[in-house]
Amino acid sequence: MKKFKKQFLAAAMIVALGAAVYLNWSMTSPASVTKTLGESKFVNATVATETTKPKASEKSTQKPSSTPAKSILTQKQKDYFAEAKTNRDKTQDKIIDKASETLGMENLSDSDKSEAQSQVAGVIKNFTYQDTIESALRAKGFSQVLAYVNENGCTVTVPGKELKKGRNIMVKSTVQSVAGISFDKITIITV
């Protein structure tokens, strides 16, 4: 009975690990969807409540109103983000594969199994933090975001043109609210 419980636990962990890898892969793979969920278009729009014609003296000084244009990334920036996400996913998949192999061994001690299970749980927790941070920052106006979360802190990469004055505090507070990481352990890199 004890052997059956161990085998059942190992099989359940492998299934959970496979589901986590699949979810991470499906969330980070480029989708062919033309619309982004949660995308807001009128966050900083000005709404006129009264329509009046400008006076003749005001016509020459008024600037035509325009909506803020979304930052356009260069091909080099797009390539960087795509390659960096792929490399991050490969590295994390290797960690999960190694832990899965460890869990699949029959003559493994309980302490080794416990260590492998905690490693898998940590990687899955970091996946969740990374995805949540990236989604939250994209919702706050960044066109691309790449977050690395590990036991030492968090590194967030964003396009340089989009990190205007004061937005670094917004990035750090977002990371802190999602992952509970202190400001001194959060690094922001611009590309």
Image: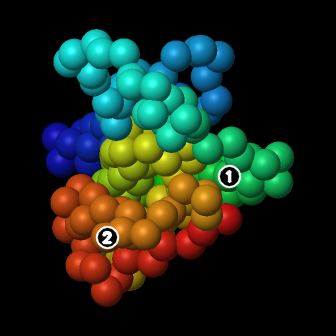
| Residue 103 appears left or right of 87 | left
Q: Residue at x 22, y 16 (%)?
A: 50
Numbered-mark total: 2
Q: Earlier in the sequence, mark 2 or mark 1?
A: 1
Q: Nearer the viewer, residue 22 or 168?
A: 168
Quadrant housing the C terminus = bottom right
Quadrant housing the N terminus = top left
Please, is residue 33 above or below residue 21 in the view? above
Name which residue type carries label 2.
Ile
Name which residue type carries label 1.
Phe
Q: Which mark is residue 24?
A: none
Q: Residue at x 49, y 47 (%)?
A: 142
| Residue 13 appears left or right of 1 | right
| Residue 63 appears left or right of 10 | right
Q: Residue at x 43, y 33 (%)?
A: 58
Which residue is labeled 1 in the image? 81
C-alpha gap between disc 2 and disc 1: 22 Å
Q: Residues within 10 Å of mark 2 (few under 14, many from 20)?
A: few
Q: Position of residue 112 (x, y in %)?
A: 35, 71
Please, is residue 36 above or below residue 116 in the view? above
Of tags 2 and 1, the one toward the viewer is 2
Task: Give the color scheme: rainbow, by chain, secondary structure or one colour.
Answer: rainbow
Task: Determine whether the residue tagged by mark 1 lies in a helix, strand or loop.
Answer: helix
Which residue is labeled 2 in the image? 169
Q: Nearer the viewer, residue 98 or 26?
A: 26
Please, is residue 51 above or below residue 88 in the view? above
Q: Nearer the viewer, residue 140 or 5?
A: 140
Q: Residues within 10 Å of mark 1 (few under 14, many from 20)?
A: some
